Image (cartoon, grey):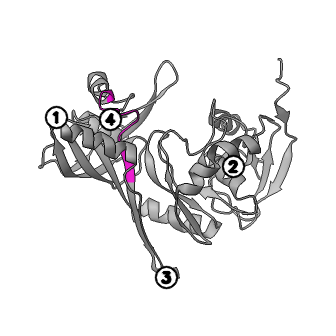
Amino acid sequence: MMISPSLKQSPVTMLTISEVRAGQRIDNFLHTYFKGIPKSHVYRLLRTGQVRINKGRIKPSYRLTVGDVLRLPPVYEKPLNPKACRCHHKKVLTNAILYEDAFLLIINKPAGLPVHGGSGIHGGVIENLRLLYPNAPYLELVHRLDRDTSGCLMIAKKSSMLRRLHELLRKGDIHKQYFALVQGHWSSRLCRLELPLKKNINQSGERIVRVSNEGKSAITQFSIEQYLSTMTLLRIQPLTGRTHQIRVHTAHKGHPIAGDNKYGDETFNQQMRHHSLKRLFLHASKLEFDLPEINYHMTVHAPLPEALQQVLNRVNKR
């Protein structure tokens, strides 16, 4: 097999987990540790038993504990180019910061920028933030947004905060709000959807999420923000955090989101391109949570991007 000269092979590494990494899922740790390999390869390493903890195999959902001995196999990594990343994303990410303290960073993620790198993607939000914060000992994604979705994204700066926020996510105690422009007039009586979702992989290897009785519970609440000609601007609160939940729930009810090339309607998307919509009209506008045990209360808003507001203005004028 020919190996590209731009790839660098890492050695076999044995690590003992400290308190800083304790509580983190092994797959998330590996995404951080191996910065230059695709996400799919990380899961292959786990599936084939090349990554081991205390000499045994583990599942991707395994959470690291203090004292675990982790074996990391040799892999070929494509090093990130710090200068290229800084030049391209420094200004964007700096301007996107909504809130920051010693425990947490919240940004207004731009549409089109993935939260982490992967196959064909040379550096996402988290990789570039680590380059922008070279002295930060710890930066980890608390949750994720689709590449084409903009809005509030949390990054933990302490492992203790990451653990607390993951516990809130599991309990449904982080309140999220989105704005979405959907096709057609949404019924005012349709305020809540409980439709289980299941991930599937099609023949081309693309991940597709479908409503299925065999899937995991998914609950979404809706309210109407504004009716526009043949569209509706919705205010949405996902009560669970399934992959593509909002996009699949709206499409399943016959109201796909404007600009959704995976679950949407191509004719509708073509019409929206005439209104200069060049992206998915889905924006995470608000995050709210409380951690009373440490007197930490958070409410943050991300304003609707100017490009999306202009689309609404054009639709209103017509």
Q: Callout 4: few (<14), some (14-19), or many (20+) C-alpha neighbours within 10 Å?
A: few
Q: Is residue 5 left or right of residue 264?
A: right
Q: Is residue 242 left or right of residue 98?
A: left
Tell me which residue sits at (45%, 60%) in the image.
169
Expressed as whole percent of the image width and height from the top left, the position of residue 144 reads 50, 49
Upstream in the sequence, badge 1 or badge 2?
A: 2
* Residue marked by disc 4: 212
Indicate whether 108 appears above or below 173.
above
- Which amino acid, by three-letter code, is at mark 4? Ser
Residue 150: image location, x then y, percent:
44, 47
Label whose residue precedes the other's in the sequence (4 or 2): 2
Which of the two labelled residues, at mark 1 and mark 3, occupies the earlier sequence position?
A: 1
Q: Give the CA separation, mark 1 to mark 2.
A: 44 Å
Pointer 1 residue = 230
Q: Check disc 2 and report the residue beneath it.
A: 32
Where disc 2 sits, the SS reads helix
Residue 56 % position (x, y): 74, 47
In percent of the image, x 83 and y 18: which residue is there? 2
